[in-house]
Image: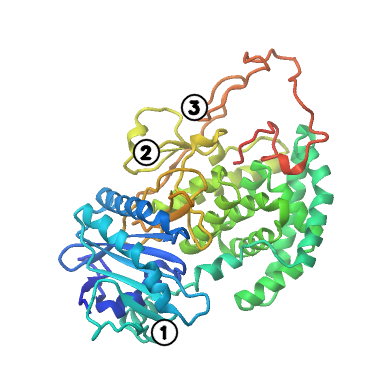
Amino acid sequence: MNKHQESTGPADGQQITLRGPAELADALPYLMGFHPDDSVVMVALHGDRGRFGGRLRLGIPRAPGEWGAVAAQLAESLIAGSERREGRPDAILIFLCQDSPDGASGRVTMERLRPFAQSLRTACGALDVPVPEALCISDGHYWSYCCPDVRCCPPEGKPLAMPGTTVMAAAAAYAGIQVRGTLRDMEARLTPWQAPDTAAAQLRALDRAAPSLVARILNDRAKDRVAEETLTLARTLMGRLGGMPPAPEVVSDVGDDQAVDDEEAAAVILGLQDRETRDKAAAWMEGPDGHHALRLWRTLARRCVGPYGEHAAAPLTLAGWVSWSTGDEPGARVALTMALRADPHYTFAQLLHRACNEGLDPETLRRCLRGEARAAEAVEEAGVAVEAEWPGEAEILTPSDEGEAAGVSAGVERPGTVRASVGAQEPGEAEVLTESHEGETVGASPRSERPEKEAGAERPEEAGNVGAAGAAAETVTARGPALRVRRVRPAVSGTRRRGSGRRTTGTEGRPPVPGTARTGPTAAGRRASDIRRYDRRGTGTRR
């Protein structure tokens, strides 16, 4: 058995030393914040004592033919991300976590994944970074791919330690750190209903509400009224959920589903498809309001059944934002990943997911939302109607871009040259690393972006698309600099807003003449499922 000493903390802080594969296997859920089932996890080590650095997680690709290419991308991404953050890693640990279908043939699973483990070791070695240990964790046992001695690494594997009996468990309990269960359990709380009866009833409610609500949302004169009705109903439902007695999560979810009827859920789900309405709902992000709103967004995400699955992007993104705002980063990544799985081009989810993965502090964004909420209240009291500005008209720039543009609303201090506009209308304008594998928690958008892994000491994961199967990888990043936000005035009609990626033109590519009607199909007769975003423009990119 290979013996190692790895430190979980920085050299100048409190450290926990892990000795040997047994303690490494036990520490994995505490490093990730959940049990990473159906995943490959890679952890960068720094220094002579093996201090933990960046962590990368990828849903294990189902097709063995993809393993070689995926391994090369993951090794390159983790090493490159570590170099940007903490320097080149001195070693990498590899964990392959997957239970057998029957729960009793972990050794078969271990042997089936051995070529993948070997590909990962080879890819790291090709980049001059050694792999001192590679473990397979399956059915409550672990195996070492690096130790050939059957005396310490028997073929039947060694059992994992009892929960709560290791040094990592004791340190986590002392620090108040809790493991959130398995990735599968976390995703189940946000997955649309599958039971035929309940799903069919909710689908009928959505079908009944969609024609009238979509038409009103697309009508400039009725749009504000729909937003008001949506937010009022959402506030009513939050109060109803908040009045229910405390209960365990599973019981609480069942009670929340029963407290919201199908027609109410349909009205709020459709109303949140309007970007401005969704942005106003994002102000419920802390305190009792945040807790109650999170329960409502989870409930609504479970109601986006059948062809309305794409509509779940809005409540899932709000759930991710509230989770991140309240300090639950693993839960935030799960929700934001599922939002991007529902709609890969949902810009709000893309940028929140990226900001969370960059280790940015959400407080700056909270201050912005608080200011907008206070401004809206003042406007209502004065009886004046204005259109609120918020991160929908902002940009996130890397440091290299900050000196180039005036009109930047937010800066992300991160090496690179990626610029993303929160209000982008074109899918290519806001690129973020997301996750999309069936067992993932944070992941890759189904688009063909390469994974970009960031290294850090304590942040759960960022993901990228790897391989033809669309599997996704994620990394843990250290908390970075604060997100800087300032408001940007809307551009004059008919001109190009910096970073927006759109220009208002007529049907022949020329700016429309004031007073003329814009040609095109009317809202009447358009199917609700064909409308990607409900706003005045009726464009095809969801924000």
Whether residue 361 is visible here, answered yes or no, is no
Q: Amino acid at mark 2?
A: Thr
Judged left or right of residue 351, residue 9 is: left
* Residue 213 coordinates in the image, percent (x, y): 80, 44
Report if the CB atoms under discs 1 and 2 are less than 8 Å apart. Answer: no
Picture disc at residue 398: 2
Local SS, label 1: loop
Q: Residue at x 52, y 39 (%)?
A: 422
Residue 375 vs residue 71, the one in the foreground: 71
The residue that mark 3 highlights is 498
**Label whose residue precedes the other's in the sequence (2 or 3):** 2
Instruction: Say whether residue 320 is left or right of residue 229.
Output: left
Relative height, residue 46 to residue 6 (above, below): above
For label 1, the residue is: 163
Rendered view: 492 above or below 429: above
Q: Quadrant of the N terminus?
A: bottom left
* Quarter occupied by the C terminus: top right
Query: Is the residue under label 3 in contact with that under label 2 (CB below 8 Å)?
Result: no
- Give the colour scheme of this rendering: rainbow
**Image quadrant assignment for residue 285:** bottom right
User: Where residue 240 appears, x then y in whole percent?
Assistant: 73, 66
